[in-house]
Amino acid sequence: MNQKELKELIEFLIEKDIAEFELERGDFKVKIKRAAEPSHVALPDSRYIAVQHMPSTVPAPASAPGRFDSAADAAAPESEAGLHIVRSPIVGTFYESPSPGSPPFVKVGDALEVGQVLCIVEAMKLMNEIECDVAGELVKKLVANGQPIEYGQELFAVRPAK
């Protein structure tokens, strides 16, 4: 089973809401377990969870929550409204380049195409290429290189092409 087949299998299991799966083919064996999804109770915004778990990667707010002290702060949510968020399809470690010392796959401001590799997520010693699912311009990289990431975590913000 190659990396692409494994990725498709994981996506299928997520789509069908299968929590545990085991496959054995000759000497190849794979066992996949997913954590149960939390019930659909009002959950906190994932951006605040990232601040709580990784304070060194996200700057602290300049003012009290819910208050805007300047026109620039008030305009920020409006400019982010049309952005497409690329999320992690798996749990693993985020890598911005194919190998240490090589340039990143993408940089802020780059024009992106559908299917273009954005990063690699290492999971269980497998390097999974994460591809862009929309054409546009890369506006933000939301994860630091080498950082552990969770399923569904926001990785990139892309301004879709018109």
Image (cartoon, rainbow, N blue to C red):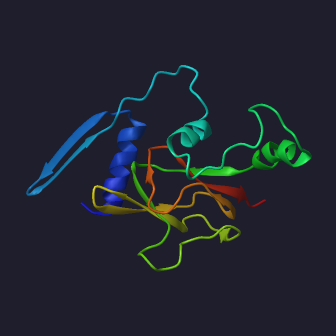
Please identify the quarter of the rendering in which residue 19 is found: top left
Q: Which residue is located at x 74 percent, y 61 percent?
A: 161
Q: Residue at the far left: name it.
A: 26
Q: Give the number of marks.
A: 0
Question: In this orientation, which residue lies closer to the viewer: 74 or 83?
Answer: 74
Question: In this orientation, which residue lies closer to the viewer: 143 or 160?
Answer: 143
Q: Which residue is located at x 84 percent, y 37 percent?
A: 68
Q: In this view, does 136 lie to the left or right of 17?
A: right
Question: In this orientation, which residue lies closer to the viewer: 113 or 50?
Answer: 50
Q: Residue at the far bottom: name it.
A: 102
Query: Which quadrant would the C terminus be assigned to in this image?
Result: bottom right
Residue 15 in the image: above or below residue 119: above
Return the x and y of residue 153 as percentages of the image width and height: 52, 45
Q: In this view, does 2 lie to the left or right of 155?
A: left
Query: Which quadrant would the N terminus be assigned to in this image?
Result: bottom left
Return the x and y of residue 70 as percentages of the image width and height: 89, 44
Q: In this view, does 29 lie to the left or right of 39?
A: left
Q: Which residue is located at x 33 percent, y 34 percent?
A: 18
Return the x and y of residue 105 as percentages of the image width and height: 54, 72
Q: Is residue 80 left or right of residue 69?
A: left
Q: Which residue is located at x 32 percent, y 57 percent?
A: 5
Please identify the quarter of the rendering in which residue 3 is found: bottom left
Return the x and y of residue 152 as percentages of the image width and height: 50, 43
